[in-house]
Image (cartoon, rainbow, N blue to C red):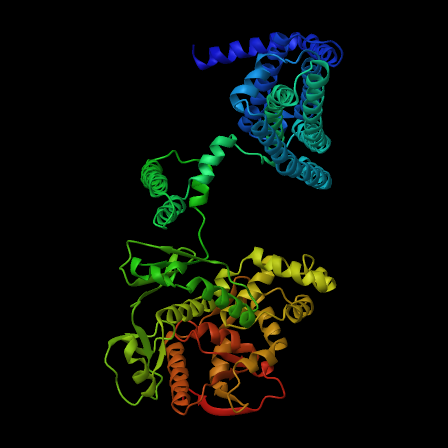
Amino acid sequence: MDMATNQAVNTAWSAQISRYSDAILALVIALIIALLIIPIPGPLIDGLLIFNLITSIVVILVTMFNNEPLQFSIFPTLLLVMTLFRLGLYISTTRSILSTGVAGSVVSAFGSIIIGGNYVVGIVIFLILTIVQFIVITSGTTRISEVAARFTLDAMPGKQMAIDADLNSGLITEDEARKRRRDIQREADFYGAMDGASKFVRGDATASIIIAAVNLIGGFAVGAIQQHMDLLTSLQTFGRIAIGAGLAIQIPTILLSTASGVIVTRVASDSDLGQDLTKQLFTQPRSLMIAAVLIAIFGLVPGLPKIPFFLVGGLAGLASYFMSQSMQQQTLTDEAESAKEKPVTTEALIDMLQVDPIELEIGYSLIPLVDPDQGGDILDRITLMRRQIAMELGYVIPPIRIRDNIQLPANEYRIKIKGVDVAKVETIPDYLLAVDSGITTGRIEGIGTKDPAFGLPAIWIAPQAREQAEVMGYMVVDPTSATITHLSEIAKRYAHELIGRQDVQQILDSIKQHYPVVVEEIVPNVLTVGEIQQVLQNLLSERVSIRDMVTILETLGISARITKNTDLLTEYVRQSLGRNICKQHQSEDGRLDIVAVDPLIEKEISEAVEYTDQGIMISSDPATTQRIINELSGAIEKAFAQGRNPVIICSANIRRPLRKIIERKLPNLAILSYNEVAPEFELQSVGMVSLT
């Protein structure tokens, strides 16, 4: 028969039993009462003892094959019924032993075959079984039942709230919610019942010791007094029968105790106990191999038998080898299956369309820089880098996706911004990068290159030449540091492209927790989140920190009532952040080195500027624009030659247009307006930009 036919037959058979379940249960209760009151003949006792044994075996197997405890929720009640049934068997066997001196062939078999007819051995075995059940299994089961019941009851309110939340959000239907609530109630009832039912098992173990002692002492007295046996014959005869009866009933008791322990320690799973054991216990062939080696080493110890240790160690080693081969084969099979073309779902296509904000692709030779198992720490250093950028710019850049790309040259890495390459660098993992600091006293041998972050002349040198390079004035860094520095500069340079509306909303939500009035006054009545985003992008494009968001928002709250032009709003915000901006460009002597712009240039730029809804439009002569750029570049180079790091300073009305003019040619040149200079900063002129 096929599986469907078997299921149909089993369902019909179960239905027939369920139809007469009430009658069967009443018959069982009547049988238990009969065992307590009516003398039972030996053959019937034999049948009941065998029934007790097979029922215990079925119960423990059911607990092992179930995936979760609630699949056997009747177990606590069944445990009580089985305990009463065993007590009835105890009474019937005791009555038969003391009255006739026999208790059926099953008891005689347990007394003769299992303990070999030696009542002393039988007493020892019986006591060991009882002690194991009473001290080990029953005590542990009782404790676990108590803890499980308490934890289940404590967790009920949280589970109920989770169901209500899922129902309110539409994740589940009313019927599903009702079913889940019922399951939670059943789980609480089950563990509460198991907490009480475990006491039955504990009491059963205690009763078995007492009843066995009564059978032994009572049988000895009956044999010696009523049947006039000598003391040794009476002790041997009734001791063997009493211990046989105790073992015949105690062994099923241990099985039920174990079943109760299994069911309260079982965690919900998708498979039965046997499958879970196989999956979780034999997934590490190395553990079995180490154990096999240790067992074999024990066989070399003088005095220990060599053959058993070597035999077991060899079998364990073979098992470990075959397990390892099987796992490798399974891995290859899984890879082959995953390599097969699978139907692409709509969700998968949508996931493929997602673009990572920042991405670092590396060649296969650079994998050791990333892999922690090979000593790579680039992941930890990226975390520190993101934290440092957050402190400098006031914006947490998105997580950086790192992936290997076999299509890249082995020593090359690429940095992508929103899926587009913005940097491509070749690095040498086993070398060090010696950067020319401008004060070097010679040239060291190596492979010429450029510092990827700032474009300075550099040389790849062998690690043993590091000390020599440092003495000559080179700044020496490892490949990971060079990569992190480059990645940091890229992240700062493109921070204005990375910050999105969702990021701005998160910033506003954070500020609103402590300054609710500041946020509520602006958003959404005065400015939208998108307009605030444009202002923050303008600031980040010139590496102005947006950490002081309260000042930024307060300035926007005032200025946005005058104009909605985000370029003008940016200038107002810069003036409010003037102290922080000047501090950023302050020289070591505390001054602000400046290169001023000739008023004629300012006038020409001012006349060419037009503010529109699309932003600032500049309609200047290209030749004049190029001359301005060249003059600015020359003035800055002269200042650099004097050891100064100046900024360009001009009037507020042309600062933003001038920035737009030079941002392609001189993107890192800082331009400040006079209105941004805080009073406490002293200006030091190091040049003038003029077209004359």
Task: Say which residue appears at 51% left-offset and 69% top-offset.
Answer: 389
Image quadrant of residue 628? bottom left
The answer to whether residue 591 is above or below residue 290 is below
Q: Quadrant of the C terminus?
A: bottom left
- Which quadrant holds the N terminus? top left
Residue sitting at the far right = 37
Q: Nearer the viewer, residue 115 or 503?
A: 115
Q: In this orientation, does residue 264 appear?
A: no
- Residue 98, percent from left and from top: 70, 16
Residue 123 picture location, percent across and down: 61, 29
Determine if residue 292 is in view. yes
Residue at horizontal 40 percent and vertical 36 percent from the top: 344
Name above or below for residue 616 compared with residue 260. Answer: below
Residue at position x 57%, y 12% from top? 105
In front here: 148 or 45?
Answer: 45
Seen in the picture, residue 395 relative to 75 is either above or below; the reply is below
Of the pair 605 and 578, the residue shown nearer to us: 578
Q: Could you say where residue 669 lies in the image, as x and y percent from the top left?
A: 45, 78
Q: Position of residue 53 (x, y in %)?
A: 58, 19
Q: Is residue 430 left or right of residue 676?
A: left
